[in-house]
Image (cartoon, grey):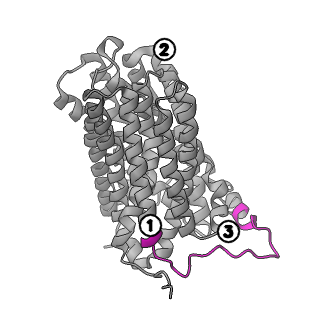
Amino acid sequence: MMHAKPAVRNPWAWVPTLYLAEGTPYVMAMTVSVILYKRLGISNTDIALYTSWLYLPWVIKPLWSPFVDMFRTKRFWIVAMQLVLGASFACVALTIPASAFFRYTLAFFWIMAFSSATHDIAADGFYMLGLQEYQQAAFVGVRTIFYRIAMIAAKGILVVLAGTLETRGFSVASAWSVTFFLLAAIMLALFLYHLFALPCPASDRPVPRDPSRSASAAFLRGFVTFFRRKDIVAILAFFLLYRFAEAQLVKMVAPFLLDPRMKGGLGLSTSEVGIVYGTVGAIALMFGGLLGGWVISRNGLRYWLWIMVCAMHLPDAIFIWLSRTMPESLWLINAAVALEQFGYGFGFTAYSLFMIMVCEGEYKTVHYAIATGIMALGMMIPAMSSGWIQEQLGYSGFFLWILVSTIPGFIVAAMIKIEPAFGKKEQ
C-alpha cells in the first residue's frame, strides 16, 4: 500500500535547503562565471558583455511566471529545475577543458540561468503555499540567511577549492572542471532530497483558468495598472539607475583582484579572491543588509533613505585608493572590499523596501514580478559595457568613472516619494 506524501512538514526540513538551492545557481551564473572566464584567459570586454546577458532570464521572468502558475504544481517545477540545474553544472564541467570552451560553457550557463529564474518563481510561490502566514513571517529571515550562505559557499568555498586545486598541480581547466562536477553532485543531491522532503500542500495546484476570460487577461491588467501610475517615471528611473554604478563595478571587481600588478590589478590568487570577495565580502554584504532592515524597522525608510544612498555609493571610492596604492597586505584588501560590500548591503535595503512599497495593492504579485524584472534590466545594461570601459581607461580610470556613475543614483533618490511611516515597526 502506497502512503500519500505529507501535506505539511516542519519548515526547518525544507526552507533552508530550498533557498540554498535557489541562491547557488544565481551566484554561479552572475559572479563565479566571471572568475572562471578570467582564469581561462577571456578578456574583460568579453567577460562583461557575455556574462551580463545572463541577466536576461531574470529580466523577462515576469513574462513566463503565469506559465509556472497555470501548468503543473510549484513543487513539480522546483524539483524539475533542480534536476536541470544539476545537469547544467555537469555539462559546464565537461566542456571547460574543450578547445571551444567559451561557446559551450556559455550555452550551458544560459540553460542554468533560465532554469534558475524559473526555480525562483516556483520556490517563492511554494514558500507562501507551504507555510501558514505566521510561519512565513517567522522564516523570512531564515530564507534570507540561507540564500546568503549559498552566496558564501559559491563565491567563497568553491572558488577557494578551485584555487587550491590549481596550487596542487591541476591545470586551471581541470581545477574548475572538478569544482563544477562537485557542484553538480550537490545540486543533484538537493534534487533527490527535495523530491521526498518537500511537503505537498493541497493549495499547490495549477491556477484554474476561467473559460470566459483570456488566460492572460488578469496578468495584462496587472501590467497596465503598474505602468499607469502617475509617478511611474520616477519609479522606473529609480529601479533602473539607483545601482547604475554598482552594476558596472560588480563585473570588474574579480578581474581587478585577479589581474597581475603589471596590468593594474592586485595579483591575488584564485583562493585569495575566494576569501576576499567570496567570503569576507559576502559576509559584510549580509550584515549590511541585516543592519539596514533593522534600522528601517526603527525609524522608517524615509528617515534612512539618504544615509543609505550615501552608504551605497560613497564606499565605491575605496577602489580608486586600491588601484592607486596597490597595497600588498591581504588584511587591507579584505577591509577595503568588506567596507564597500557592507555599504552596498546597507544601501540596497532602501531599494528592496521601495520595491515592496510600490508593489502594494490588488496586483502586488504581478507588480513585484515586473519590478524585479526591471531591477535585473538595470543591472544587465550598464554591466555589458563595463569590461570595454575598463580596458579603455585602465583600472584606475575605470574606478574614477564608477565614482562619476554614482551621480544618477543620488538624482533618482531625490525623485521618489516615500510615505513617512513606511517600513517602521508599529510601537
Residue 194, disc: 1
Q: Quadrant of the C terminus?
A: bottom left
Element assignment for label 1? helix
In the displayed structure, 239 sits above or below 167; it is below
In the displayed structure, 283 sits above or below 358; it is above
Badge 3 density bin: few <14, some 14–19, many ≥20, Cα 10 Å: some
What residue is shown at x 36% (from left), y 48% (from top)? 151
Residue 365, disc: none
**Going by the image, does 411 lie left or right of 425?**
right
What residue is shown at x 38% (from left), y 36% (from top)? 313
What residue is shown at x 50% (from left), y 88% (from top)? 1
Q: Position of residue 411 (x, y in %)?
A: 49, 38
**Residue placed under numbered mark 3 in the picture:** 70
Instruction: Name the chief secondary structure element in magenta.
Output: loop
Boundaries of the magenta span: 194-220
Answer with mark 2 or mark 1, whichever residue precedes in sequence.
Answer: 1
Q: Is residue 41 magenta?
A: no
Q: Amino acid at mark 2?
A: Gln
Element assignment for label 3? helix
Q: Amino acid at mark 3?
A: Met
Farthest top residue?
262
Answer with mark 1 or mark 3, whichever residue precedes in sequence.
Answer: 3
Dot 2 and dot 3 residues touching (CB under 8 Å): no
Q: Real-space Cα distance between discs 2 and 3?
A: 48 Å
Q: Amino acid at mark 1?
A: His
Figure disc tally = 3
Farthest bottom residue?
1
Q: Indicate which label's residue lies in the foreground, 1 or 3.
A: 1
Q: Quadrant of residue 27?
A: top left
**Residue placed under numbered mark 2 in the picture:** 392
